[in-house]
Image (cartoon, rainbow, N blue to C red):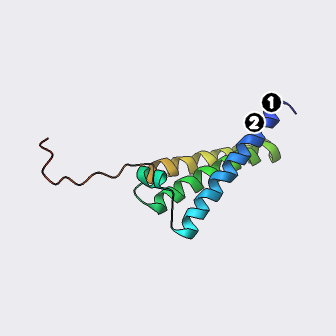
Amino acid sequence: MDLSTATLLVGGAIGLALALFGVRMLVTGRAPAGTLRTFTGVRPAALYHLLFGLALLLIVVGQVLFTGVPGLAANVLAVIMIGVALARYRPRRRRPVDDGRTGI
């Protein structure tokens, strides 16, 4: 197995894991505490991971199965999905409630 094949396998596995993690959060409505600290809620966290995972899978599938214009279209669609994930569902820490006692 050469390095490019190994990289595609690892990328596909990571994409699948991210997508399944996103689906699990959407289905159960729960997320790990560390994930919830980074995002504003479960839904944005789930969609962020789902979009990134599917985009990574699309890049891998596009590299393996498609050549020419279909492969390019798969990559462009993956970049658009990543753009949507970053623009719409990016990690944002929740702002602490200011109770006026901080003195800042």
SS for tag 2?
A: helix
Q: Who is closer to the viewer here, 20 or 33?
A: 33
Q: Is residue 44 left or right of residue 20?
A: left
The residue drawn where x is 80% and y is 30% is: 3
Where residue 66 sits: x, y (%)?
80, 46
The residue drawn where x is 15% and y is 45% is: 102
Bin the neighbour count of mark 2 within 10 Å (Cα to Cα): few under 14, some 14-19, many 20 and up.
few
Q: Amino acid at mark 1?
A: Leu
Q: Is residue 9 left or right of residue 18?
A: right
Q: Amino acid at mark 2?
A: Thr
Q: Are marks 1 and 2 in contact (CB under 8 Å)?
A: yes
- Residue 56: mark: none
The residue drawn where x is 55% and y is 66% is: 26
Where residue 39 sits: x, y (%)?
43, 53
The answer to whether any part of residue 88 appears in the image is yes
Residue sitting farthest toward the right: 1
Residue sitting farthest toward the top: 3
Q: Which residue is mark 2?
A: 7
The residue drawn where x is 52% and y is 47% is: 83
Where residue 49 sits: x, y (%)?
56, 53
Q: Which residue is mark 1?
A: 3
